[in-house]
Amino acid sequence: MQDRTTKQSAYLHTIDLCVLRYCRDTQALEILLNKRDGEPFAGHWALPGIVVNGDVVDLSLEDAVERLRASSKVDMPLAWIEQVGTVGDAFRDPRCWSSSTFYLAIVSDPVPLAEHQVFQPLNEVASASFKLPFDHNRLVAAVQERLLSKSLYSSLPLMFLGNEFSAPEAVSIFSLVLARPVLKTSIRQRLLKMSEAGHLAETGRKKSGDGGRPQATLANLKPTQLYLFDRCFLE
């Protein structure tokens, strides 16, 4: 029988990334998972994460996040990243008392995946119909809730579309993230406000849209910044 005193004296802190993308083929949001190569839960799909302790070179949480992003567990450019929260208790990790600082991240460009990586539908993971080890399903559910709540009053969903997109694509991504239809006029008004504020500009180009009809595109002039709307979608 394991000595409970020994177990309680140990401690782990991890940085975990919930990297989301918009899959145009399935019209769904997906989350990046990494196959674990060590115990506990070796061979299971889990969130990409790293341990932070006194033996690592990181001088800050930002350093640790960048180390994880650049590692083989992620290894892709991120259009957006923000900290969602920190959780911890004596039960989430079978090894010892542990805590995790976890993040919402978005990737907009298509990226090749390694054999130990996979994108899984976000709804399946957030609802725990696709089981992850530790408390990772709970972390993903919290990230999904953050994405939805912040999308009610900001341009966050546009991060999924990259630096050039059409108005119909904006309608589709807002409707998908908010899990309900969004009026075209409402989105166009928001895009107009962003253009007036210098966040968007017409490109003069068109791309194939619904039914194959060309759609004018907009360029995101401030791709690393969110625009905060003066009204929430629920108002």
Image (cartoon, grey):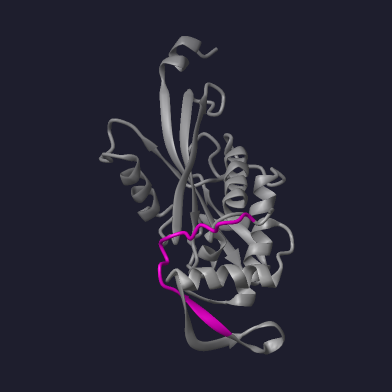
Whole-percent x and y of residue 163? 46, 73
Left/right placement of residue 33 relative to residue 121 reads left
Q: Residue at x 59, y 41 (%)?
A: 142
Total numbered labels:
0
Determine which quarter of the picture holds residue 135.
Answer: top right
Residue 185 vs 69, above or below: the answer is below
Whole-percent x and y of residue 133? 59, 38
What's drawn in magenta, residue-wise?
216-232
User: Does the magenta run of residues contain 217?
Assistant: yes
Q: Residue at x 55, y 12 (%)?
A: 1
Q: Residue at x 62, y 51 (%)?
A: 148
Residue 42 vs 20, above or below: the answer is above
Determine which quarter of the picture holds residue 138.
Answer: top right
Can see residue 10?
A: yes
Left/right placement of residue 174 relative to residue 15 reads right
Can see residue 3?
A: no
Whole-percent x and y of residue 174? 64, 63
Relative to the observer, which residue lies in front, 119 or 41?
A: 119
Residue 216 vs 199, above or below: the answer is below
Left/right placement of residue 148 relative to residue 58 reads right
Relative to the observer, which residue lies in front, 95 or 228?
A: 228
Whole-percent x and y of residue 74? 44, 55
